[in-house]
Amino acid sequence: MITRLRKTAFVAALFVAVWIAVFVWWKTTRHAPTARELLLCGLVLPAALAVCAAWLRRALGPHPALAAVAPPSSSASTDAAATQDPTSHTWSALLLDSSVRLPTGATTADIDAAAREERSVALHPELQRPDGTGVFASTVDSVSLDRLDTSLLAPDARETLQDEHWRGLLLAADALDELRERHAVLSGAAADAPPLRLHLLMPERWRPVAATLAAWLDAHAVREAVAPGIVRAQLRTVADPVQAWAVVDELIQALHLQPSGELHVVLAFDSTASQDAVDALDRAGRLYGRDRPNGMMPGEGACALLLGHPDTPHAMSVPSIHRLAAARRAVSADHGKAEATTLEQLLAATRTRLSTLRPDLSAPGFVTDADQRSSRRTEVVTVSEQIWGDDAAERSRHLGLANGAGGAALALAALAVAADHATEEGQAVLAASVSDPLARGVMLVTPAMTVDTTASVPQSGTVAA
């Protein structure tokens, strides 16, 4: 309303100004205006000036900012197509293999053991705050920047990268190489076999250098002559771990909407375990400390998941990952608000889905990316005790306690650990992400189906021959 009144007042003032100027001109020149001049100068001229002024204000004024990230059209079309299929909520993908690199180990067994023992992040021997005091941080011991082959980068690109980028690249390369080499041995793939499709996930803060990092990994993958080959399907930057799970969910949908024999690798990596990253967290007031109990403990990691359609041939019993259930908290957890309702509702919905999909299973396991922050611990402990009572601690694994902040890499590692539990125990496992202040997600992981249960589960597509 106020804006409209301002525009009206501006036009009226413009008309009055034109009339006064013309009247003064005619009076000083002693000119007697004709009827045509009265019409032109009284109406047409001020109206034309008003239109020109409005056009200039629109052209030169501020424009609304464009969205920083435009969602891929393929994702939007995939979601739209999935909603038209009434069985889309039953879709899943096989987790054929995984490879992890975290501070607590390079195997899911090591990572699970550290979480079971509830080890915590210690003071780092080298990283410090600007005032010289120590920093709680967790790093992967095997990372050595001397191992990095900088020749795979364009000369002008090297100066744009910092230690955290280099560390992340080394972790990603190690995880990817291990996964590819093991797959080559187990599958016996020939050199002309269809290449693996790589879905690369990086943190949003690395967006300016994401293309540079991806180019290095592409060159590294080409140099590693392992059959089958690998081609990059997409590069995504994610703002929180739940967005990384959303990429997995999109892939599950795509596998069912367009079934094929292709296998997909989802690779995420992250690192805040460098002095530059610590300084940046400290400046932003986000570094964990006595005065910041909800701050971050720097960490790092990489995780690669090998996914395929449920009908993909496989020699061993492999678990399945089901569709994502996600929501956002009403209030940020970083404000110390001990609210577990959102996570509780997501877990309840996922357990209901489990009872429909696999009534033969229960869900005795719970794997999360929760860390030392009291708000996150309270949230996951509250919901786990509601479900499992006194057995909650024994059934739960919170990977962030010993690994620190791992972002999307830690979230994918939670799926890998959950998959191992599902296979070993023959029961379903719930994976939850609570690392972000607002985003919450839950994914269900189930063991391989037996002959008795296969017939009762709805199928929605077959792999093309």
Image (cartoon, rainbow, N blue to C red):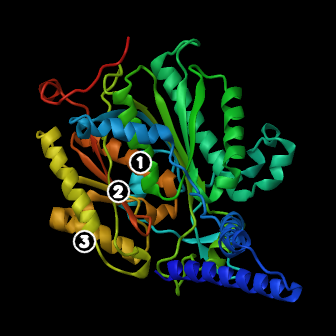
Q: Position of residue 161 (x, y in %)?
A: 76, 54
Q: What residue type is labelled 1?
A: Ala
For residue 126, say whether it is visible: no
Mark 1 vs 3: CB contact within 8 A: no
Q: Distance of mark 1 from mark 2, alpha carbons?
A: 9 Å
What's the CA distance linking mark 1 and mark 3?
Answer: 25 Å
Residue density around tag 1, few if under 14, some if 14–19, many if 20 or more, within 10 Å:
some
- Label 3 sits on a secondary structure element that is helix
| Residue hosting label 2 | 441
Query: Is 449 left or right of 55, judged from the image as shown?
Result: left
Instruction: Give the residue displayed 88% in from the left and 84% down from the top.
Output: 29
In the rendered image, residue 249, in percent from the top left (x then y), is placed at 38, 42
| Distance in Å between CA atoms under marks 2 and 3 | 16 Å
Q: Which mark is residue 246?
A: 1
Secondary structure found at label 1: helix
Look at label 2 and name its amino acid. Gly
In the figure, residue 200 lies in which quadrant? top right
Identify the residue at image location x=34%, y=69%. 329
Q: Characterize the local packing of mark 2: few (<14), some (14-19) or many (20 or more) Cα atoms within 10 angstroms.
A: many
- Asked if 186 appears above or below 28 in the picture, the reply is above
Quadrant the C terminus occupies: top left
**Residues under numbered marks 1 and 2 in contact, where contact means CB atoms less than 8 Å apart:** yes
Task: Give me the residue at 21% from left, 35% from top.
Answer: 87
| Left-right relation of 445 to 7 | left
* Residue that mark 3 sits on: 382
Q: In this view, does 63 lie to the left or right of 320?
A: right
Residue 11 at x, y = what percent?
62, 78
